[in-house]
Image (cartoon, rainbow, N blue to C red):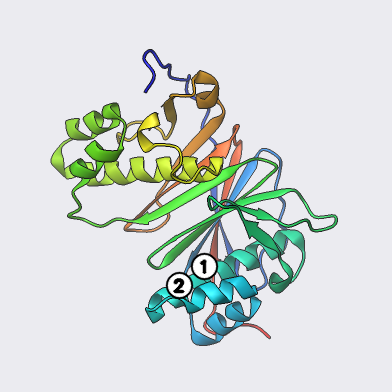
């Protein structure tokens, strides 16, 4: 970390709203404002008819990647996550999921292939265990990371190896019983920021700092790239379901964040 790097003043928190949508119809009205972020949360353990429908919507490259999973459960989760991503994007584009076209950059950042007359969507997907999160914005870079909390991890060893020194020190200063939750807050905020930038792991994890204490709001605190980079981003911490921790990183501010819980029925509609 560059000596004397500065922290930004706290940004006003976004208004967070939870709403419910039902697959496959989606919300009756779906409007995404320029200063809004939409988050979609869905379970990945789906009935066989729904999984088969989602599989049919995948592109050839996605089907090929799904086929490479050796464990059936991992394959089913991949199909569900990417099929639901296509469903979500199709709701905004007003097009069937199988006609949604997007590409993956070499470092993993997804982007839509041009759809005539479509809104300028930016999006990101994360899934862990039985849960998926999709973030959608207009014109602004966005990243989301979701992790299932696993107790018993060597959180201090991992943080001292990969985190910035002040992050590792802040984690160590917490009571032992609070460290696992703080570790996952730090990890997901870092990953969401990297995914929003599209850097993958080419940007070292110790070259920037995020908040992690339970009393602190989610924020990018410092960056080796300077204060301008710090002010460029807004972070939001989330607890989308028991046993999970997530974070959102969005370029600029977000006045409103709408979190859609996507409910999937036992059998899909025709």
What residue is at 60 percent from the left and 41 percent from the top? 256
Instruction: Name above or below for residue 83 compared with residue 11.
Output: below
Q: What's the mark number on residue 40?
A: none
Q: Residue furthest top?
A: 4
Q: Quadrant of the N terminus?
A: top left
Which residue is at 71% across, 40% downward?
A: 34
> Does 181 sit left or right of 132 as displayed?
left
Q: Is residue 57 above or below residue 86?
A: below
Q: Is residue 222 above or below residue 41?
A: above
Pick the front one: 150 or 164:
164
What residue appears at the point 40 percent right and 68 percent down from the top-left corner? 130
Quarter residue 185 falls in: top left
Specify whether residue 264 is in view: no
Query: Disc 1, disc 2: CB below 8 Å?
Result: yes
Left or right of 116 on screen, residue 228: left
Between 77 and 64, the residue placed more toward the observer is 64
Nearer to us in this view, 62 or 19: 62
In the displayed structure image, the side of residue 224 where residue 102 appears, left or right: right
Residue 77 - label: 2
Q: Which residue appears farthest toward the left when viewing the image?
A: 176
- Residue 50 in the image: state x and y as whole percent: 56, 81
Q: For mark 1, does the 10 Å Cα neighbourhood hold few (<14), some (14 to 19), or many (20 or more) residues? A: many
Q: Disc 1 versus disc 2: distance between alpha carbons?
A: 6 Å
Observer-nearest of 16 and 80: 80
Note whether 16 is above or below 115 in the view shown: above
Label 2 Cα neighbours within 10 Å, binned few <14 / some 14-19 / many ≥20: many
Q: Is residue 192 visible?
A: yes
Please state the horizontal and vertical placement of residue 172, each as a whole percent of the image. Answer: 18, 33
Give me the residue at 53% from left, 81% from top.
51
The residue carrying mark 1 is 81
- Determine whether the residue tagged by mark 1 lies in a helix, strand or loop: helix
């Amino acid at each position: 970390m560059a000596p004397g790097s500065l922290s930004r003043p706290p940004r006003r928190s976004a208004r967070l709203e939870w709403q419910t949508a039902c697959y496959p119809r989606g919300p009756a009205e779906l409007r995404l404002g320029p200063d809004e972020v939409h988050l979609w949360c869905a379970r990945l353990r789906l009935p066989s008819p729904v999984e088969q429908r989602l599989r049919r919507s995948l592109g050839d490259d996605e089907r090929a990647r799904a086929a490479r999973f050796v464990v059936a459960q991992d394959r089913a989760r991949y199909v569900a996550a990417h099929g639901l991503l296509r469903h979500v994007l199709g709701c905004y584009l007003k097009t069937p999921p199988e006609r949604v076209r997007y590409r993956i950059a070499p470092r993993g950042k997804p982007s839509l292939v041009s759809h005539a007359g479509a809104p300028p969507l930016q999006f990101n997907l994360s899934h862990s265990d039985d849960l998926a999160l999709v973030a959608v914005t207009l014109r602004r870079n966005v990243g989301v990371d979701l992790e299932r909390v696993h107790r018993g991890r060597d959180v201090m060893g991992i943080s001292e190896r990969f985190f910035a020194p002040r992050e590792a020190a802040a984690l160590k200063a917490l009571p032992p019983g609070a460290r696992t939750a703080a570790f996952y807050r730090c990890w997901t905020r870092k990953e969401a920021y990297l995914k929003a930038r599209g850097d993958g792991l080419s940007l070292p994890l110790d070259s920037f700092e995020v908040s992690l204490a339970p009393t602190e709001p989610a924020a990018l605190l410092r960056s080796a790239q300077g204060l301008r980079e710090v002010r460029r981003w807004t972070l939001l911490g989330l607890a989308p379901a028991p046993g999970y921790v997530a974070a959102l990183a969005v370029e600029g501010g977000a006045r409103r964040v709408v979190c859609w819980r996507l409910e999937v029925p036992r059998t899909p509609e025709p």
